[in-house]
Image (cartoon, rainbow, N blue to C red):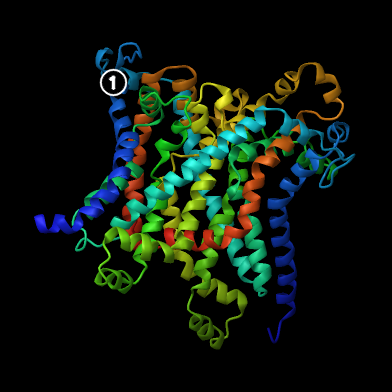
């Protein structure tokens, strides 16, 4: 900017201040949760803790990591994400690739597409879905958390749009060299699609990690709960969990309480999102823009 | 035809696993809709349960709790869409005024973070912040105001839902709008400058009009989802005290159908919602295709 009027200078200052305040509002609640989780129960209940721990203690974390239930839920979630993301990636690739072909190259393409788009438009609703999974005998099994969600249609369409963006010559060259459809897909298409696969793979990781309802629906035994479903039960009765620690209860209570204990477990559960987020933000943005705003 | 199949069979083979699983988990439940017309009894199953015609629908439409959940769903959804759009567009425009690319990226990154946090975790954080003795109320008291019962006051609760949702998700819209702003042809701005337009007039007469198509597209697509007022969010924040203003169709179905075991009535409500949703989504996709050239396939 070569020349700025006074009005513009004032605007810029206010603009910066406003944007900073809004951004802080998105960030400070997380910082507050972190601070609470490391503070003593007395400091928290007297309202002294804002963004820095008061009377630092790691008790709430020790409780979470030793408590058994948290760790078990974490294991369920980890296994679920591993299975879920692998199945999702496999299904998205095998589905998006044929559908990225034009009708001239793959005659039945549009029938399959209608088959998938219909699932976005209409479904049986929550209760028939529940009854079906029940009749298949999947209740209480880890498969109930991954199989019903095995083909994420929106993400598949994002991947399909990425594939459509590739130049035809790439594939034709491979075909001319004698590679079949499957070999072309594995050896030519997938390697150049790494960013796209990272995008949809991470979307599906975020979905599986954050989903609590599927666990609440299909897991009748709380020991099979994935992390978010377990955390959901804590929102209403964390004190119950503390009381279950039996004889340690009173000594525990002097070093942590509901609020600090819950804050620690919430923070541990959102940590993976915070860790992967900076790395994948770039992919997320391109993926979103590619997928959602395609002419 | 045969020749075609000989060349194309690997495509069909690739598609097969996904088609089977989608058929099982997305198409078979549609069969369960017949429950909506039955007095469903799990012991008797779909075949044996007695048929009752439209009785379940008559029953739900005479249930005040259901009617108010429809009203709440529309109320919450529509205000979410309006405020969401306003917040995202204005924030994108403000971010666009920042010349420093690295600062722009940092702000964008930060406001996008809450999108990735589940509503369960967010609810845990918000219940703490918005409690009567929470940090927000401490701030209000420090400024001389009276504490607000964000979570338990039934006339405030819907707005707690609307505002926290806008706060959590506006970063997504900001990213999309900012990406569209970047792709506006610089020549338009040069022409505007030659005509003597300052920053404000450039924004008013170039940037905003150029954003209309994408804004309309985003609004139309969210209008298609108007019946999804945010199950995860409402379910994790509400309590019986705020049911009159906070209960939405999805939470109503969940409580009635699964927690109280009224399968048939819950399915009837679900079917009612599916039919309207299907119409709205088809309509929104059609409009998006017709006016913004947006296609899902």
Residue B43 point in image, percent of width and height: 34, 11
**Is residue B186 something that shows in the picture?**
yes
Q: Specify whether A277 is left or right of B147.
A: left
Q: Quadrant of the C terminus of chain B?
A: bottom left
Residue drawn at 53 percent across, 55 percent down: B85
Q: Is residue B275 above or below residue A91?
A: above
Q: Is residue B48 left or right of residue A41?
A: left
The spot of residue B55 in percent (x, y) is: 31, 17
Residue located at (55% from left, 42% from top): A209
Label count reads 1
Q: Identify residue for label 1.
A: B37
Query: What is the quadrant of the N terminus of chain B in the image?
Result: bottom left
Residue A75 falls in image quadrant: top right
Residue sitting at 47 percent across and 27 percent down?
A141
| Chain under callout 1 | B
Q: Nearer the viewer, residue B46 or B168?
A: B46
- Element marked by disc 1: helix
Front residue of B121/B173: it is B121
The answer to which quarter of the image holds residue B86 is bottom right
Q: Classify A259 as above or below A150.
A: above
Q: Is residue B21 left or right of residue B135?
A: left
- Residue B47, by quadrant, is top left
| Vertical side of A43 occupied by A202: above or below | below
Q: Left or right of B128: which side holds B157?
A: left
Q: Give x and y (percent) for residue B175.
A: 55, 61
Q: At which x and y percent is residue B74? A: 47, 39
Q: How many residues crowd mark 1 within 10 Å: few (<14), some (14–19), many (20+)?
A: many
The residue closer to the viewer here, A101 or B245, is A101
Residue drawn at x 71%, y 52% as measured from the top left:
A27
């Amino acid at each position: 900017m070569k020349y700025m009027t006074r009005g513009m200078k004032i605007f810029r200052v206010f603009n910066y201040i406003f944007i900073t305040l809004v951004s802080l509002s998105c960030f400070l609640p997380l910082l507050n949760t972190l601070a609470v989780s490391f503070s003593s129960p007395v400091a928290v209940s007297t309202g002294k803790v804002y963004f820095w721990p008061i009377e630092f203690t790691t008790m709430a974390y020790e409780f979470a990591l030793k408590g058994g239930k948290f760790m078990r839920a974490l294991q369920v979630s980890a296994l679920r994400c591993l299975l879920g993301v692998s199945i999702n990636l496999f299904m998205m690739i095998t589905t998006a690739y044929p559908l990225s072909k034009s009708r001239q190259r793959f005659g039945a393409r549009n029938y399959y597409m209608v088959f998938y788009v219909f699932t976005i438009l209409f479904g049986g609703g929550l209760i028939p879905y529940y009854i079906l999974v029940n009749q298949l005998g999947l209740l209480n099994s880890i498969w109930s958390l991954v199989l019903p969600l095995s083909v994420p249609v929106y993400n598949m369409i994002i991947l399909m749009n990425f594939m459509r963006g590739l130049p035809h010559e790439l594939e034709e060259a491979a075909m001319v060299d004698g590679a079949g459809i499957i070999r072309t897909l594995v050896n030519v298409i997938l390697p150049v699609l790494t960013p796209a696969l990272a995008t949809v793979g991470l979307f599906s990781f975020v979905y599986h990690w954050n989903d609590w309802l599927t666990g609440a629906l299909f897991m009748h035994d709380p020991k099979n709960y994935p992390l978010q479903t377990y955390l959901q039960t804590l929102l209403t009765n964390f004190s119950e969990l503390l009381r279950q620690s039996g004889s340690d209860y009173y000594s525990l209570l002097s070093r942590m309480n509901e609020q600090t204990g819950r804050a620690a477990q919430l923070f541990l559960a959102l940590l993976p999102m915070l860790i992967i987020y900076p790395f994948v933000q770039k992919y997320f943005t391109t993926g979103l823009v590619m997928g959602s705003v395609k002419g | 035809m045969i020749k075609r199949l000989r060349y194309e069979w690997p495509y069909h083979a690739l598609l097969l696993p996904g088609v089977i699983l989608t058929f099982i988990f997305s198409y078979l439940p549609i069969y369960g809709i017949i429950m909506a017309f039955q007095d469903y009894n799990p012991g008797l199953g779909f075949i044996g349960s007695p048929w009752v015609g439209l009785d379940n629908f008559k029953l739900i439409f005479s249930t005040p709790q259901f009617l108010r959940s429809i009203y709440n769903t529309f109320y919450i959804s529509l205000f979410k869409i309006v405020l969401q759009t306003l917040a995202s567009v204005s924030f994108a425009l403000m971010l666009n005024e920042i010349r420093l690319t690295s600062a722009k990226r940092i702000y964008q990154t930060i406001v996008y973070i809450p999108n990735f946090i589940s509503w369960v975790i967010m609810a845990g954080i918000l219940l703490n912040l918005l409690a009567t003795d929470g940090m927000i109320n401490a701030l209000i008291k420090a400024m001389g105001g009276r504490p607000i019962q964000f979570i338990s006051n039934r006339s405030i609760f819907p707005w707690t839902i609307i505002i926290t949702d806008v706060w959590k998700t506006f970063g997504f819209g900001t990213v999309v709008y900012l990406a569209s702003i970047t792709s506006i042809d610089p020549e338009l701005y040069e022409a505007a400058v030659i005509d003597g337009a300052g920053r404000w007039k450039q924004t008013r007469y170039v940037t905003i009009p150029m954003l209309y198509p994408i804004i309309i597209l985003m609004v139309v697509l969210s209008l298609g989802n108007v019946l999804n007022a945010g199950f995860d969010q409402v379910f994790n924040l509400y309590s019986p005290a705020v049911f009159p203003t906070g209960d939405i169709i999805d939470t109503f179905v969940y409580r009635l159908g699964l927690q109280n075991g009224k399968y048939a009535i819950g399915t009837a409500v679900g079917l009612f919602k599916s039919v309207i949703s299907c119409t709205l989504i088809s309509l929104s996709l059609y409009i998006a295709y017709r006016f913004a050239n947006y296609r899902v396939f």
